[in-house]
Image (cartoon, grey):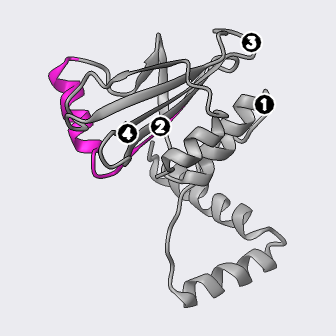
Amino acid sequence: MITMKEFMELIDYKITESDTYGWSCYGSNAYQFSCWNGLHDKGGYSFNIVFSTKSQKVFEVSVCDYTNNRAYRMIHPDKLAKYQQEAKNHDSKPNQAWDDIDFIDLEVDDDFMEKALAIKAGENYDTRVMINFDVDSDLELFIYREAHKADMTVNDFVVDILTKYINEKKIT
C-alpha cells in the first residue's frame, strides 16, 4: 500500500478537502484528504486517501479520471472485508465511484502511481491492471525460454498465456 508521504508528494501537498471518514470500517481514527483540480470533465481529476490519524496507516487510496470516466482504487487487504460488509450494511454499491462508473481495484502500488501520475499530467496511460505473482525458479526459467522462442517479451508472453486461459475458462 502506498504511504502518506507518497500520496502527499503525488498531489504536491495540495489538499482541497478533508474530513473524518464517515464509515466505521477503518476504525474511529480514520480521516480523509482529497485533492480535486476543480474540473469534472476534460482534464478533471481527484485524488483521495483514507488513513489513521494515530498510526498514519493508509487504508484506501483512489484516483478519479473525469476525462476518461475511469476510477482506480486500492483498499488495504486487511480492511477489504470490513469495507465490503459496511457497504452492504449501508445498502451502498461498494464499487461505485460516481454515477455509473465503478472503481477498478488495483493491487500493485506501481500500477496505482503510474496511472495517477499520468492522469494528473493529462497523459494517456495503460488501462490494464498489473498483478504480482510468485513462481519457482524452474517455472521462471521455462517462461523465459518460451518467451524467447516465441520472440516475445516476458510480460507479453505472460499476458498472452493469461488471456488465453481466461478466454478458455470464460473467467470474468
> Which image quarter holds the C terminus?
top left
69 over 53 or under it: above or below: above
| Amino acid at circle 3 | Lys
Q: Secondary structure at mark 1?
A: helix
> Label 1, label 3: how many angstroms apart (C-alpha)?
12 Å
Mark number, residue 51: 4
Q: Is residue 117 left or right of residue 15?
A: right
Mark number, residue 112: none
Q: Check the image and name the residue furthest to the right.
A: 151
2 or 3: tag closer to the N-terminus: 3
Does the magenta portion include 89? yes
The crowd level at tag 3 (other Cα within 10 Å; few <14, some 14-19, many 20+) is few
Residues at marks 4 and 2 touching, judged by CB atoms closer than 8 Å: no
Q: Position of residue 11 (x, y in %)?
A: 63, 33
> Label 1, label 2: how many angstroms apart (C-alpha)?
18 Å
1 or 2: tag closer to the N-terminus: 2
Decide which of 124, 140 is in the foreground and name it: 124
> Label 3, label 4: how many angstroms apart (C-alpha)?
29 Å
3 or 4: tag closer to the N-terminus: 3
Decide which of 38, 167 is in the foreground and name it: 38
Seen at 68% across and 16% down, the residue is 44
Decide which of 107, 159 is in the foreground and name it: 107
46 over 161 or under it: above or below: above
Mark number, residue 121: 1
102 over 158 or under it: above or below: above
| Amino acid at circle 2 | Val
